Amino acid sequence: MQYVEFKSAIQKHLRGRRQGATWVELRETLALPYDRPCPEWTKRLEQEIGLVRRKGAGRALVWGLDRAAEKNQ
């Protein structure tokens, strides 16, 4: 999987889920081939699509899209 495919899959999934999703949910739902998210790709997603990660239950981080940044795209 290349970055462009990864970005597209994450963005499309999160646009449909206003409550966001954890990495495990994303990995399983999208059948991603990675155990953990790549830090470099995650940083690019923050800059390019407005990815935000907020504290969830326990140690989980909930991935979502910054709605203000999304409107500017």
Image (tube, rainbow, N blue to C red):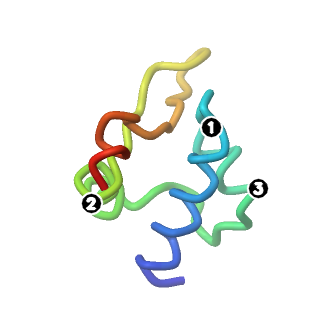
Earlier along the polypeptide chain: callout 1 or callout 2? 1
Q: Give the CA distance from mark 2 to mark 3.
A: 21 Å
Residue 29's tag is: 3
Q: Nearer the viewer, residue 44 or 67?
A: 67
Within 10 angstroms of label 1, few (less than 14), some, or many (20 or more) residues?
A: many
Q: Secondary structure at mark 3?
A: helix
Q: Amino acid at mark 1?
A: Ala
Foreground residue among 4 and 66: 66
Residue tagged by mark 2? Answer: 44
Q: Are marks 1 and 3 in contact (CB under 8 Å)?
A: yes
Precedes in sequence: disc 2 or disc 3: 3
Which element is circle 2 on? helix
Secondary structure at numbered mark 1: strand
Q: Position of residue 66 (x, y in %)?
A: 37, 35
Callout 2 environment at 10 Å: few (<14), some (14 to 19), or many (20+)?
some
Q: Quadrant of residue 54?
A: top left
Q: Earlier in the sequence, mark 1 or mark 3?
A: 1
Which residue in the protein does label 1 denote?
21
- Picture coordinates of residue 41 (x, y %)? 34, 63
